[in-house]
Image: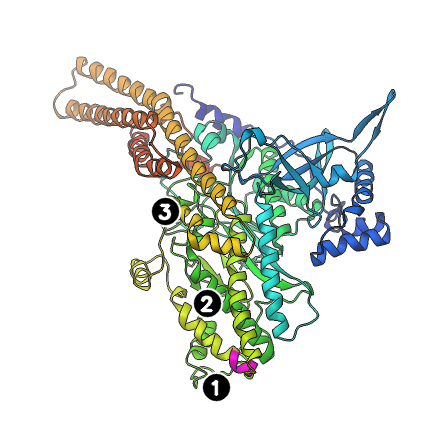
Amino acid sequence: MGAFTARRAAIEALTQFRSVAPRINFKETPISAIYGSNVFNEDVQRQRLPKQIFKKLQQTIKRGVAIDPGIADIVAAAMRDWAVEKGATHYTHLFYPMTGLTAEKHDSFVSPEGCSAILEFSGKELVKGEPDASSFPSGGLRATFEARGYTAWDPTSPAYILENPNGITLVIPTAFVSWTGEALDKKIPLLRSMEALSNQAMRLLKLFGNNTATTVFTTVGPEQEYFLIDRNFYFARPDLINCGRTLFGAKPPKGQEMEDQYFGSIPERVLACMLEAEQELYKLGVPVKTRHNEVAPAQYEIAPIFEDSNLAHDHQMLTMETLRRVAEKYGLSCLLHEKPFARVNGSGKHNNWSMSTDLGENLLNPGDTPHENAQFLVFCLATIRAVNKYATLLRVAISSAGNDHRLGANEAPPAIISIYLGEQLQDIMDQIEAGGAKSTKTGGHMEIGVTVLPRLPRDAGDRNRTSPFAFTGNKFEFRAVSSGQSIAGPNTVLNTIVAESLDYIATKLEADIKAGKDFNKSVQSLLAALIKENKRVIFNGDGYTEEWHKEAAKRGLPNLKTSVEAIPHLISKESIELFGKYKVLSEKELHSRYEIYLENYKKTITIEGLMTASMARTMILPAAIAYQGEVAASITAAKSAGLKGKPLAEQQKILTELGSAIAGFHQAIDKLDKINEHHAKGDSLAHAKYSRDVVIPAMNAVREIGDQLETMVSDNAWPLPTYREMLFIK
Ligand code: ADP
Ligand code: MG
């Protein structure tokens, strides 16, 4: 036995683990019986609301008609009755502040009346809440003297109940606004961007003769990657608790090189946890569909069926929350950080995205008729143009200190935003660009509005994992989004930039029609021009290679390697014009987000810097010095027992090597301490740059020697759970 360490206690505890979670039995309670059972969904609304009220509410939900404030009292009463019957005592306005997390404040339904209490919930309480919100980041949008913000009911995302062993709460998804009307959250810009896109997409649909659709929704299916490790290890790692990622850890003898994890059989405890998480999500009406092992050891994925972006966003937040919560019951910890472990893959959140009419027509689905195909190509090229024109804004939308570990690290897409089209769609684009030239592949003229396109493969069989933005048959997949982040930001940007391109295209085509030009011919020449102007962003090769980085530079594509480089683009002239024009984010709102992103970056790195120094000094250094003492004592003993010559010299070498590593380590910690105490002068950008250019290298220097010490110090004395334990003991 070695010294007592938290690490040994963790291993000891986990061998004793017995799940206390109740058994789930899908035979007794089939999915069909529980799906959506905790949601105030369309069925419940139909049953409980007067017909007229139900109709009005549905028009808001399905067709984006503004909510009639007159119906709030009746909806609130129905919601309360439904929730109270299910055992609810409290309600909460759930909102999505700029922390990227969710926030909630609970109020009870109880209202005293004489000596007894009645349960009340008025329309006013449904529609508007006033949390004391002065502690949420606002990036200067609210001075504390006018700190109030309020939450506003989002009728398009259904209310639901959240179960806890000791009670039930009615949860109402809301938007969070300042008194002056500025968005303080991530939901409002998302909703605004969906509306902007819908307005522009409808113009185009009209040109294509579609007079039946009334709204266009953007749709999203986010694939969530995450790690599950034993909870005892988690508690023994202050870095995981406070930073979400390990700041130390030598490379384990076995990593992911055997490629035996991806799609491998799921360990029993993990599967049990997934099943319960899925059951919880079914109750909440979250359409989770797929689960599997991911590439890194202890890494997994869960993916739902796509929904409209707003609902997908709310459900995605619920999914992260549910995974975290349920994991605990199984003695596991769910790690949603982008890079919890160095040297194995990090986690992303592939954001599958498309546009759909309210009648369910997927606008990125190549059709069977020339007409449908022309329309498809227009929407597809609008997206390509948007990504080319506003690549920097997409890069901003995925920026965070955590995601910088992934992007460009040859496991995740590079920071260069490019589009993968696949061979067949590329061929079609080439032909259109050439102006309907004879094609060897399809053997005919490609004339838009006349020719049927060759069938595109809808299963993304020939997928290219190295591309940040890939066309996968009937949708685009934005792969650079990170595991821990809210999908609201990336989708807000995506929707807005595509809205701008749809606007551009609709304006041109409308002018052509006005000028009496042939519609098909106009479309054909516009598409050819769009391809010519934007094809530099298309890249079908391997995004990890050095050649691509050179080629991309030649093409003039931005390569913003760190978030600190990316974030300032949010307040560029181009960005302010774009978001202002489509009323998604005002200049003031953009500035607030710019401040918040930079602050968040700086704070993250500051905490990591302090934690690195603290763990190094109080955990690793003492273990290393104690072990050095043991070695020294053993050598003295061996020497006095008569050991000499080469055998003695070899052992002294152990001591010398250890001594130098400890000395180097100590120097590196001292240096980091000084850097941690010091702060950059100037604005938030200066602070973020200091974090990136000064703190991170100093942290890395400490880690490098710390990890080296892990391979030198006696295993018995090592205080921190190691990678080989955390990733492989399941
Ligand atoms: P993969 O091969 O990446 O697993 P899938 O076809 O299973 O691809 O889809 C992955 C995700 O894409 C799922 O969440 C799915 O619901 C979503 N998806 C499919 N069609 C669309 C669409 N039209 N819009 C948005 N997301 C979609
Ligand atoms: Mg995918």
Q: Colour mode?
A: rainbow
Query: Any magenta on residue 725?
Result: no
> Residue reaching furthest top?
640
Cα separation between marks 2 and 3? 28 Å
Type of amino acid under label 1: His
Question: Which of the two residues, 598 or 159, is positioned nearer the viewer here?
Answer: 598
Tell which residue pokes out farthest to the left in this image.
645
Q: Does 111 sit above or below residue 180?
A: above
> Does residue 116 appear left or right of residue 212 in this picture?
right
Q: In which quadrant of this rendering is ligand 1 seen?
A: bottom right
**Residue located beneath label 3 in the image:** 565
Label 1 environment density (alpha carbons within 10 Å; few <14, some 14–19, many ≥20): some
Q: Which residue is mark 2?
A: 421
Q: Quadrant of residue 279?
A: top right
Respond yes or no on whether mark 1 lies under 8 Å from ligand 1.
no
Instruction: Write down the region rendered in magenta.
Output: 518-522
Task: Residue 532: name its quadrant.
Answer: bottom left
Is residue 702 in sight in this rendering? yes
